[in-house]
Every structure is written in C-alpha cells, then in structure tokens.
Amino acid sequence: MAELGMSSAVTRRAFSVRKMTGFTAVAIVCFIMLYAPLLPLVAYSFNSGSSIALWEGFSWRWYEAAWRNELVQDAAFRSLFVATLASTFATALATMAALGTTRTRAYRGLTAIYAMINQPLMVPEIVTAVALLIVFAVIKTATNYHGLVYLITAHTAFCIPFAYLPIRARLEGMDISLETAAADLYATPWKTFRRVTLPLLWPGILAGAMLAFVISLDDVVITEFVKSPGQDTLPTYMLGQLRRVITPEINAISTVLLTVSAVMVTFFFFLNRKKM
Amino acid sequence: MNSAKGGPAAVQALNVSKVFGEGDSAVVALDNVSVNIRQNEFFTLLGPSGCGKTTLLRLIAGFDHPSNGAILLEGEDISGLPPYQRPVNTVFQSYALFPHMTVAGNIAFGLEMLGKSKPEIDATVTDMLRLVQMEELKDRQTSQISGGQQQRVALARALAPHPKVLLLDEPLSALDLKLRKEMQIELKRLQHETGITFIFVTHDQEEALTMSDRIAVMSAGNILQVGTPRDIYDHPAERFVANFIGETNFFQAELVSVKKGAGKIKLASGKTITATVPDGLVANGHITAVVRPEHARIVEPGASSTLVGTLENIVYFGTDTHFHVALGGEEAFIVRMQNARDDAGKFSTGMNVGITIDANAAQVLRD
C-alpha cells in the first residue's frame, strides 16, 4: 500500500524514476523474487500425489482433505471469528483516533500521539508477543479464564495502526469546508458527523477494516505466544503441521488464504481510489 | 434598493477584534472594527487578500469567535452562538456542496436540520430550484454539473432556510469572466426577489462597484471607508481607498478654506479649485488631493487650464485615450478622454498642454 502511494507520487513529477536506466530490469527482478515462490506453492496444491516437490497429476484431493479435516475447520473458524471481532474493534478505535487527531486544532503532544498509535508497526512483533505472553499469563493464573478474549484483545491492538492509516488519510483528504457548511446549515456536531463526515468516510473505514482483517488473519507470531492450548488459528495450525509430515494439504490451505488476502487487498485498493 | 437607507441594522459589529495565535506569532486579523449593515442591503466587504474581510464574514457566520467586541444580529448579541444556532447562511468560495447528495438533497439539507415537515421541505426545494433555474437537474449528483450550476446550487442551498442574512465569500472567483458577469446580475436579482440582506466579500473592485448598495473598503484589519459605490469611487477619503479602487492622480496642494465638506485648494501652479474635503479636516496647509483621470481634460495651454505640463505619452484604448502629462517632479498626471470627442486627436507627444479639472472632481485625502 505504501509502495503504491509512493510510486504514484514519484511519477507525477517531471523527473521520473521510471525513465532511469535499469529501472525496468530491477522492477522485473523484484516482482519475480516476490511472486515466483508462490507459483510452485499454488501449483502443488493441485498435485494428485502426496509430495510437495514431485508432480504426479492434477487433482482437487488436497482441497477436499483440508475441507474435511476437522482441525483445519476448527482453526479456520477461529481465525475468521478472531479476525472479524478484532478488525471491528480495531476499526472503531482507529476511527475515533483518526477523528481525534485530524478534527481538532493542533495541540501539544499531537506528534507523540501519532507515534503512539503507529508504534505497533515499529516495535518488533516478537517483543510484543513476549510481553503479552507474560502479562496474559499473570491474568490467566489470577482469573483462571483461558478463553479467546486474550487473542481478540491482542489482535485488536496490533490491527489498530493498520486500520488507522487509511481512515486518517481519507479524513485529511476530505474538504473541511463540507463540515463547516453542514454546521452553517443548522446541523449540530453530531448531525454533521452522521450526515456528512461518516458517509464520506465510509470507504476509508471499510478499507481500514479489511486491512485489519487480513493482518489479523495472517498473524503467526503474537498468536503463537498468546493462544491457550487448543486455540490454533489457521496460520498457527499450519506452523504446527510443518513440524510433522508436510503434504500438499498445507499448499491448499495456503492457496485459499492467499486468494482471500489478494481479493481483499484488491478491493481495498479500489476503495481507496474512490473519489472523495 | 436605496429604500434600505436608514433601516434598522441587520448586522452590527461593535469594536470587534480578532487575533490568531499567541505571543510572538500572534496575527491581528481584525483591529477594533465597527460597522452597521442595514436590512435588505447588498453590502460588500472589499479589500486585498489578508485585509480581514473573510475573517469578519466568518465571525458573523460563527465559524470563528471574536477575541474582543460583539456581533449583533438584529440587535441581539450572537457572538457566543455556534454557527448552527445562527439564522445566517453562507455561500462558500469552494461551494462546499455535499458530494454524496443530489442537487435537491443539498438544497433540502438545511431545512431538514431545522426539522421542517416533508411537504414543506419539498415545496421550498421546488421554489429554490425554480429561483435558480435548476429544476431540470434536481436529481443530478453535484459532481455531474458545471461550475456555474454548482454555484447556483450553493446559492439555493444557502437561501432555502430563508436566513436573515446571506454571507457570500468570494463566490464568483472560480467562474470565468462571462459567467461571472451573468452571476453578478443573477445575484442582484436574487437579493431583490428574496429581500434578504446580502453580505458579499470580494477583492474585485469592479464587482463591488456594480453590485453593492454600500461598500466597506478594508485594509490591514481595519475598515477605512463605508459608502455607496459612487461615494467610494468619487470621494475616497483615504489614500488606500483612492489607490485600491480605479485609477487616480495624486497631487500636492494647499487647503485654503473648508466649509461643510466643500473646500478650496491651491495647486502648485498657483490656481485655486474647489474640492470635497472629508469630515474633520481643517484648513491647515499641505494636503494630498486626488482626481480621477476621467474627471480632467486636456486643453491648449492658456488661461482656462488649471495645470500645465508636457504631454509625455498617449495610450490608445479604443473607447478612450489616456494622456500622460509630466508636471515636473512626481508621477505623470493621467487624463482619460473619450475618443468620440473632437479634441481627442489634436494632441501629440512632446506638446505643451494644459489640464482642466471638472468642478468638484478633486477630493482631499485625510492623511
């Protein structure tokens, strides 16, 4: 997302990086490095044999196997459940944070608040994971509660900056005189928010929610540390499988996840491009 | 609309100051400004950018609050009210139409917020659409109509709740010349038909002169002069006003006598002419006076001429010709004469010429 924004800003200038010698070659190498490894993964998910390196023919059998596997079903449902709740909470909080940082006069400490909100993007995930493991262990011992709330809380926390960025971008791009006009036309602050700000902010909120959803769905490190026994999500289940025998079932699950992510990111891209 | 003269005040600013920022970075946008705007008046705040005209408009709308002083609407202090509690609507420079609503939806917005009934809203929206001649386009999205049409929607939206005062913040600046001329006439018509007090902000002197009942000329956070377009143009009381509006000739003279605003001034040439003198000025020697180029004429040097000089330059403008006459020392004195006049063609550069000034055309400046 960040790269997309950067490249369009660069091409708008008279000086274009794209015209520099070797640009195309470098770009092609980068794309190959990024996407070529995915091709065998996807291809072998359709392998009729049980090897992930030896092609024996086309079949849907590993998709079927994954579909029937109760452990996979269980993990997939948990992933979707956690991602849905966490992205919803994160988006609500991120929307409030975005309003609080764009719809006020600049105040002392605003920059510090930006940094605080975006901090989960900077802090190494493993550090957050270990910290949460310790805190939650204490709470788990004290309360004897081992439910999904820990996972949802953790996911909500690290999803906030991802939801925050597109929402804030949309708010900053919005013509502030629209809200002034609403106030001029007898709309109270709440009515102005409901009738003008929120309808115009929706694409940003949806984009933020989808980004948060994908981030939650993909998370391994924090989930692995925070989850209680029997709380595998799809990624942690797959990680567990890698320690045993690897079959193309993993490829099949990966391909499905990849498709979901790709569809959502594409959708996000078009939402973000939607005119103000 | 001269019937507005002497009516009760629609809007009053009483010793209003507005300071943005604090300490060293504080900027004084309005410096102790007082003005009375009458009912049903087309009142224009005219001045260059940064003079405080938009700040004053925003204070009346309630988008900002005065640092000092009060804003009165029909005699009532509204300084503390938020914009949504003031019966005042604004036409924004950028129009600020709601992009997620249709033309009709935009016009209905203010009425909905006031809690009007559905039939009443529909009736008013229909009236407004007719008033601005946009009936055909009521279901269009605002992004699908032209700039001039957006302008009309913005007007209709602001007029629909029938505000006591309509504020217009340079609403014509984004339009091309032809459309701007049309809208100037349109705005006058709307003001006449609705009977609403219009407060119009512009930096365009021609716009101000053609549309206004009265004009307040502003500079650096102060109102320098308030008057009818004719007053302001013919009798600028301050150097800034004379300079900002139209072309003018400045010259030094001596104020010999004053009686009820009419005075006699003695020019460098030794001749004495009549002039208008602003209130409070007494005959005490050196003053600066101004004469509009079209209020003077070029003549053969002789007894009838008030000033004598050398014709430096002749600039032909089609309908009229500008004669630049060097009087020695300062800038050239410019005389504008219509080309239909017989005498316009008989002068050439380098000639010695005389200038006569029309009776009472000279204006003495306060500073």
Image (cartoon, coloured by chain):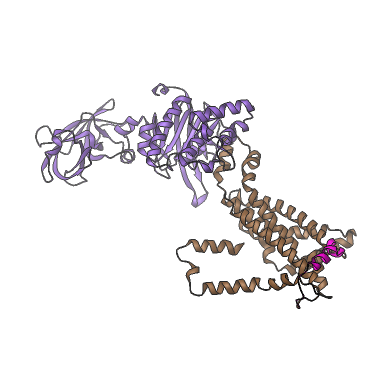
Chain colours: A brown, B purple
Residue B54, percent from left and from top = 46, 40
Q: Where does the C terminus of chain B fall, quadrant-wise?
A: top left
Q: Residue most toward the bottom?
A: A54
Nearer to us in this view, B198 or A159: A159
Residue B203 shows in this picture: yes
Q: Residue at x 64, y 50 (%)?
A: A203
Nearer to us in this view, B328 or A144: A144
Compared to residue A157, the image places residue B205 above or below, namely: above
- Residue A76 appears left or right of A269: right
Residue B116, percent from left and from top = 63, 28
- Residue A262 appears left or right of A235: left
Q: Where does the N terminus of chain B fall, quadrant-wise?
A: top left
Q: Is residue B18 magenta?
A: no
- Residue B342 appears left or right of A63: left
Compared to residue A194, the image places residue B274 above or below, namely: above
Residue B307 shows in this picture: no
- Residue A178 appears left or right of B280: right
Residue A272, percent from left and from top = 61, 54
Nearer to us in this view, B29 or B135: B135
Quadrant in which residue B292 is drawn: top left
Compared to residue A85, the image places residue B233 above or below, namely: above
Quadrant in which residue A62 is drawn: bottom right
Q: Residue at x 40, y 38 (%)?
A: B180
Q: Residue at x 45, y 28 (%)?
A: B191
Residue B196, percent from left and from top = 48, 27
Total numbered circles: 0
Name the chief secondary structure element in magenta.
Answer: helix
Compared to residue A124, the image places residue B364 above or below, namely: above
Q: Which residues are magenta?
A: A54-74
Nearer to us in this view, B95 or B221: B95
Q: Residue most toward the right?
A: A144
Q: Is residue A69 magenta?
A: yes
